[in-house]
Amino acid sequence: MQLHRLFQLSALLRSSVSLTLRRNVALSAVVFNKARDMDPVQKLFLDKIRDYSAKSKASGGIVDASPTYQKNLNEEITKLERLYGGGDLTKFPDFKFTEPKLDEASK
């Protein structure tokens, strides 16, 4: 009886190790193949994203923004500043919370 259980456990362990090794080998093969030769459409897509990222960093904002776009953006920012009382709308506001003063209740 004990020997039969031991064989069952060893078979279970062997199948789980085998499954894990197959998954790891399959996953690493997929990753290696994707890195080595990429689909041409994917490569073109990634190249365009990298180009846009470089242009965006160089211009400091939106790429190829026309003067009318900049004008509309400035008008909208002015409207929001007027509506919400000014301040810098391009940064997150700083919140300052004060600790409430609690009185100890006398017993």
Image (cartoon, rainbow, N blue to C red):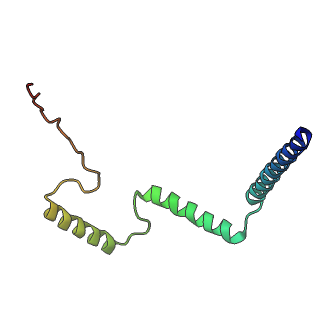
Residue at the outermost left position? 106
Q: Is residue 103 left or right of residue 48?
A: left
For image coordinates 37% across by 72% down, the residue present is 66
Q: Nearer the viewer, residue 96 or 48?
A: 96
Q: Quadrant of residue 45?
A: bottom right
Residue found at the very far front of the displayed protein: 1
Query: In the image, is 29 to the left or to the right of 77?
Result: right
Is the residue 97 above or below the residue 105 in the image? Answer: below
The relative height of residue 41 versus residue 87 in the rendered view (above or below) is below
Q: How many marks?
A: 0
Residue 34 placement: quadrant: bottom right
Measured from the top left, where is residue 95 in percent x and y? 22, 45
- Residue 27 or residue 54, whichever sits in front: 27
Residue at 84 percent across and 50 percent down: it is 15
Quarter of the image for residue 83 reads: bottom left
Q: Which part of the image, by quadrant, shows the C terminus?
A: top left
Q: Nearer the viewer, residue 90 or 54?
A: 90
Q: Quadrant of the N terminus?
A: top right
Q: Residue furthest top?
A: 107
Q: Which residue is farthest bottom? A: 68
Question: Residue 42: where, in percent of width, then height?
Answer: 66, 68
Please name the residue shown 72% across and 68% down the image: 39
